[in-house]
Amino acid sequence: MLTFMFTVRILRSLQRHFSTSVPIPKSEYASRRSELVEKIVQISSSNQSSAHHLVIIPSAEVKYASLHVPYSFRQDSYFRYLTGITEPNAILALEIECKSSDNVAFLPRLFVEERTVHERLWDGPSLGISGATKLTGIKQTLPAQCLSDYLKMVLSNLYSANGFLWFNAPFTIKSGERAPVNRSIFSLVSEHFTESKLSKSHLRNPNPLIDELRVVKSEAELKIMRQAVKNTSIALKKTMASAYSGIREAELSARFQFESALLGSDLGYPAVVAGGNRANIIHYLRNSERVEDGDLVLMDVGCDVEGYTADISRTWPVNGAFSRHQKLLLEILIQVQDECQKAATPDYSLEKLYDVMVRRLAYYLNEEKIIHVSEREFSRVGSAICPHHIGHYLGMDVHDTASISYGRNFESGMVFPLEPGIYFPCDGEKVSVAEEFRGMGLRHEDDYVFTAEGKAEKLSDCVPFAVSDLEALIGSSCKQKVLCK
């Protein structure tokens, strides 16, 4: 027990020492709130709708695996984006009054948890009113217990003014989207919304407007994301260096999480560690089997720094030696990714890059006689071989800004991965492929930022990708050169 406690103290000390905290400045959170208000005012003016609006953005809620056993808490990205607060049981309210097109008044309010002596004994202190005010600069900060009376009053006033409530209620979210909802806040808002007699036509979802702000990253955000990518690179290389034939997927997953923690990072999402044919399951999360000698292992991982995540994938032979067929597939992926990066220009989008990816995948596989199809079939066959997109927006969420179309042209400050994949499952029927390639699944993924010069800059250069560099790294735990300088 003493040894365990000593180890924990050492790890926490190391975490503090290596912590790369580069927080967003308070002024930027205030600017984000102001920009959201401006977007709502623009909509109000263009539609000649009501001059009165209320925006409610709740924190995430604590969820429990069983009695008194919570899951790890992750803050709602929209709430954190506008406040910087990482605690549960908090709500941001923005009251907006458009007196004229150039005369807009808005008042931000925060409702936060004030813990009792008993709660502090068991769960520790919370920010409280003074801490939340200091962190956010929002002067109108009240105890969360005041929220019910506040909603009753302000929604009644909103009804009288024929105003609009902006709140991400479940029925404002598109069908099929798996969006988290704070159930307790939703119940409270629903209760007072019904009492106020406001109709559902006066309820709007603010998330798409916030997505418009989030999709283009500020300099402060880019600094954090570069650090998230760097931490992911370091942790992934240390993990690859520890690999050996017969290692369990769970050990590789645990190694990555351990190395991430030493760098002061959380996981941006559950690690995908898939050996052999299991790599053909795109989001394989069981991580429970052994990776046998000669098998490839696919790892899709990302470190979270200050609420922003990286997203990097590498596929390599667990024994450290690529077979001829494995090498061929990886080199095709590297070539396709490189062509997609070069094609990323201001008149291109993720949707257009997807077309580049599927056609070039099919072209190279056909050239190497791994598949046998005509050129007119390249798009169909390429999309069957790689059923996922070339990429997605990246930021606070690994699949960031869900409402932003992949057909939108690239803009300076957008961050995204490029992740071509080749999937040839053992029982695959969609594509006829040479038998020696069956059971292989590969994904090659790096993160990029679109620059003011109109190019996609690769952020994850630190992670080896060439066959020779990967072979030199795998199983080389004693080599100090695996660290980024």
Image: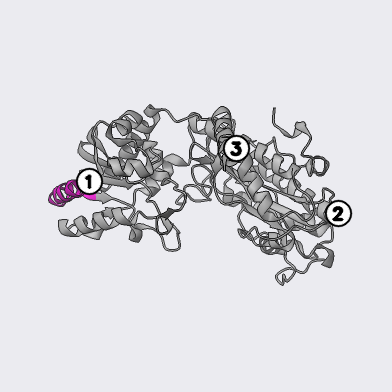
Looking at the rendered structure, the secondary structure element under dot 2 is loop
Q: Residue at x 30, y 45 (%)?
A: 43
Q: Quadrant of the N terminus?
A: top right
Q: Nearer the viewer, mark 3 or mark 1?
A: 3
The answer to whether 89 is drawn above or below residue 234 in the figure is below
User: Is residue 51 left or right of 59 when viewed as pictured?
Assistant: left
In front: 127, or 209? 127
Colour scheme employed for the rendering of this structure: one colour
Q: Is residue 450 visible?
A: no
Local crowd size for mark 2, using a 10 Å CA cut-off: few (<14), some (14–19), many (≥20): few
Which residue is the site of mark 2? 323
Residue at the extreme left = 160
In front: 404, or 319? 319
Q: Residue at x 24, y 58 (%)?
A: 190
Q: Count the marks: how many?
A: 3
* Amino acid under disc 1: Gln
Q: Position of residue 483 (x, y in %)?
A: 71, 32
Q: Which label number is shown at residue 7?
A: 3
Asked if the residues shown at circle 3 and circle 1 are in contact, with their CB atoms under 8 angstroms apart, the answer is no
* Amino acid under disc 3: Thr
Q: Which residues are magenta?
A: 147-164
Q: Earlier in the sequence, mark 1 or mark 2?
A: 1
User: Is residue 23 left or right of 150 when viewed as pictured?
Assistant: right
**Main SS class of the magenta portion in the image:** helix
